[in-house]
Image (spheres, rainbow, N blue to C red):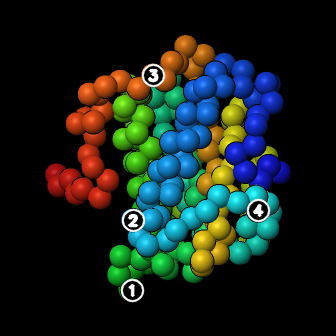
Amino acid sequence: MSTTAATPSYDDLAGASIEAISLIDGLVLDSTRALFESYGVKLDLDGSSIAKTLQSVELISTIGFSSPTLSGSLLLAMPSPVLQQTLPTQDANLADWSGELANQLCGRLKNQLLNYEVAINLALPVVVSGGEFSLPTRTRRLTRHFSFVSEWGRMFIRTEMEISSTVELVRQTGVGETAGMDEGELLFF
C-alpha cells in the first residue's frame, strides 16, 4: 500500500489533470493540518505505512461528497489518544466525535473548493469501531493516502475521487470567500 501522497501513475490520472490532483492534495493537507491545529494537535506529514498506522486505530470515519465535476469519499483513521486530544468536552462520545471530525474536515475542504467554483455536497459520516482493520486497495480510480504523526500517535487520511476530465481548478477572486461559512461557525436552522 502507498504510504503518503505518492506520485500517481498515469493510469490513475486518467480523466484528471496532474494540476487538479496536486491542488486537491494540497487542499486536503492544508485542511487537515488547520482542523487539528484548531484543537491543539500539531500534525506532521510522515512516511508511515498505512498497515502500521492501522494497528493502533480504533475508529475509522468516512464521509462521501459529490458534485457534477468531483465526487468521492474521505476516510479519517486515528487512534483514541489523538481523538481524545481534540474532544470539545471530556464526556463526549469518541465515535460520535470521530464522525464529527470527518464532517468538519470535509466541510473545510468544501469551503476551499468554493474558491475554485466547485460546490460539493456532503453525505453523513459513517463511523466504524473495532480493531485489526484492513482497507480495500481502492474503490475509485484516484486513491490518495496522507499519513501524519503527532505527539499522541499516527493517523491517516484517505481520499478516493473521480474528477471530471473537463474540470479546470482556477482560483476565482471574490468567489467562495463569502459563499461558505467560516470554519467553526455555527449554523442554526
Q: Residue at x 79, y 60 (%)?
A: 49
- Say what secondary structure mark 3 lies in: loop
- What residue would you read off at disc 4? 48
Q: Amino acid at mark 1?
A: Gln
Number of numbered discs on residues = 4
Dot 2, how many residues are within 10 Å of its Cα: few (below 14), some (14-19), or many (20+)?
A: few
Kindly state the secondary structure of the residue where label 4 is placed.
Answer: loop
How far apart marks 1 and 4 lie (CA) works out to: 29 Å
Q: Residues within 10 Å of mark 3 (few under 14, many from 20)?
A: few
Label 1 secondary element: loop
Q: CA distance from mark 3 to mark 4?
A: 32 Å
Q: Residues within 10 Å of mark 1 (few under 14, many from 20)?
A: few
The amino acid type, in three-letter code, at marker 3 is Val
Q: From where the camera sits, is residue 17 visible?
A: yes
Tell which circle, 1 or 4, labels the residue nearer the N-terminal end: 4
Is 137 left, or right, of 43 in this rendering?
A: right
Which picture quadrant has residue 22? Answer: top right
* Observer able to see residue 50: no
Distance from disc 2 to disc 3, alpha carbons, whole Å, reads 27 Å
Q: Which residue is mark 1?
A: 90
Query: For the residues marked 3 and 1, what is the alpha-carbon distance in whole angstroms?
Result: 42 Å
Mark 4 and mark 2: span between their CA atoms? 24 Å
Q: Amino acid at mark 4?
A: Ser
Query: Between marks 1 and 2, how big is the CA–CA gap?
Result: 17 Å
- At label 2, the amino acid type is Ser
What residue is pinned by disc 3? 170
- Image disc number at residue 38: 2
Is label 2 in contact with label 3 (beta carbons under 8 Å)?
no
Where does the image place residue 168, in percent across and percent down from the top left? 51, 18
